[in-house]
Image (tube, rainbow, N blue to C red):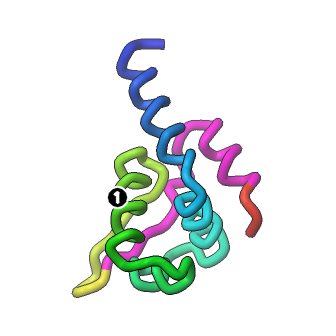
Amino acid sequence: MTVMDLKNLERQLKSLANGNRLRILSALKRKHSMTVSDIASHLKITIAAASRHLQILEQAEIVVSRKRGLFVTYRLLLTGEPWTRAVLSSLSS
């Protein structure tokens, strides 16, 4: 493993080490695609907090975003590392 691979692995593991982010991933697994406000409402957190958690997950290449007009929707990136897919498959749906 290269140093860059280790840094990517560390970033991904850290992004998964948070209860709210795991809850976001579980919700996305069930709903397939959600807006930031939908996620905030579902988790009962502020839009700013949801946005920050989603930004971290996107930087870790676990979710992807798509801007549609005024709304940004997020969905799981299912083509990631095999271990990331294993974590996602273990989340309740």
**From what the image shows, is residue 9 above or below residue 86?**
above
Among the 4 quarters of the image, the one containing residue 36: bottom left
- Residue located beneath label 1 in the image: 55
**Crowding near pointer 1: few (<14 within 10 Å), some, many (20+)?**
some
Is 34 on the left or on the right of 55, as rendered? right
Is 81 on the left or on the right of 85, as rendered? left
Is 12 on the left or on the right of 73, as rendered? right
Q: Is residue 89 magenta?
A: yes
Residue at 46% x, 79% y is: 40
Q: Nearer the viewer, residue 70 or 15?
A: 15
**From what the image shows, is residue 56 above or below residue 54?**
above
Mark 1 is on which residue type? Answer: Gln
Task: Estimate the x, y position of residue 43 in percent, counting from the top left.
Answer: 55, 77
Among the 4 quarters of the image, the one containing residue 58: bottom left
Q: Which residues are magenta?
A: 72-90
Task: Estimate the x, y position of residue 47 in percent, counting from the top left.
Answer: 36, 78
